Amino acid sequence: MSRKILISVVSALVIVLVASFSLSGCKTAEVTTTTAAETTAAETTAAETTAAEQESGVIKIGDYEFQKSAKDPKDLEIAVFYMNITHPFAQLIKAGVDAAAAEFGVNAYLTGSLEWSTETQIAVLEDLITKNVDGLSLAVLDIPGLTPVIQKSLSSGIPTTCFNVDAPDSGRLGFIGQDLYAAGAATAEGIVETMGEEGNVIFSTVAVAAGWSQDRERGARDVLAKYPGINIVGMIDAAGDEQTAYAALENALLANPDLNAHISHGGTQQLWARVLKDRNVGNINSDKPIYSTGHDIYEETLTGIIEGWTTKAYGQNPYEQGYQAVKMLYAFLTTGDPSVFEVIDTPLVRIDGTNAQDYLDRMKAGEPIG
């Protein structure tokens, strides 16, 4: 009888142990079901951060380490770098930077080079790294040339992102901007819509060698290549100050009397419209129109569309780019959360004769449009 009782007790214990092991195994499986494909880089980084690192405020992201800031937000310094701050486009970015600085109570500001030059941009960025700003976001003119500078900034412990123009292989932590290739394709599609499938088209830009200009050019060329009747007659290099750029555009117009269309890859659309207006040629309501599309939206561009000196303009919301550049870095510096770094798309805005007056009214009312 005692033997039977002993056997029953042992059997019960075995059942309990097996059940316990099975339950603990199920719990472990539930915790580890997240796949690599489902885990973001920021989440992986957070998971790899040790308790000691968390205690010390060190955040490791990829190959780089950053320190969660102990500063009061008002003492944080966030530099937003644009490639040429003398260009009107920079002022639209600045408005977004200033708005974010005021909202978050942080020392954020727009800075940059005074010309389209890799060398001068590197010099300004090197100064910011030496100054050890708390956060840095930059628009990249020369991706190969500035990639080592971005990596130096990251290695120095400065959280660094890109906006407007990306350097995705640099190790930058996040990006705010537009698909430049798609934007370039849209300008060419806009020309075909108005000009038709035959005609002579000329390109222009203020920075022929810049990655953002080349991406837009590539998008435009790929669209126009579908139409055998469309001839691209050349590219106008309108680098330099406004007077120099105007002269380059005017000379190209005079040298190509049979032009039917113009596509700006950046910085030249409003000047091209000014050239046409000054010479009183090419208005879209005339017998010999010269259709024109391009990027970025200024008051002069909108007026040009309304008056017929340009055809369509495509904006990328530079205000939002400047605002989000500050917001992203501020969020990381104050929380230490790597998941705040992401890619934010600022969608394409198309303006033509159907909505130009509305946008002009909104711009004059103070709405940041670009």
Image (cartoon, rainbow, N blue to C red):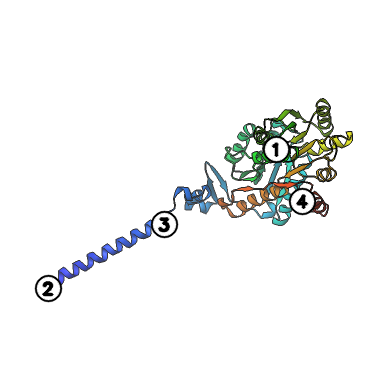
Which of the marked residues, 2 or 3, is nearer the chain's N terminus?
Answer: 2
Query: What crowding class fits label 2: few (fewer than 14 Cα within 10 Å), some (14-19), or many (20 or more)?
Result: few
User: Does dot 3 land on a helix, a strand or a loop?
Assistant: helix
Residue at the image point whose x is 51% and y is 54% from the top: 55
At label 3, the amino acid type is Val
Tell me, yes or no, whether the two marked residues, 4 and 2, touch with CB atoms within 8 Å.
Answer: no
Which of the marked residues, 1 or 2, is nearer the chain's N terminus?
Answer: 2
Which of the marked residues, 3 or 1, is nearer the chain's N terminus?
Answer: 3
User: Does dot 2 land on a helix, a strand or a loop?
Assistant: helix
Q: What x and y, as percent, mark residue 365? A: 82, 55
From mark 3 to mark 4, how far is it between C-alphas? Answer: 47 Å
From mark 3 to mark 1, how far is it between C-alphas? Answer: 51 Å
Residue at the image point whose x is 24% and y is 65% from the top: 15
Residue 166 falls in image quadrant:
top right
Query: What crowding class fits label 1: few (fewer than 14 Cα within 10 Å), some (14-19), or many (20 or more)?
Result: many
From mark 1 to mark 2, how far is it between C-alphas? Answer: 94 Å
Which disc number belongs to residue 368?
4
**In the rendered image of this protein, does residue 250 appear above or below residue 28?**
above
Identify the residue position indicated by label 2 in the image: 2
Q: Nearer the viewer, residue 359 or 193?
A: 193
Which disc number belongs to residue 31?
3
From mark 2 to mark 3, how far is it between C-alphas? Answer: 44 Å
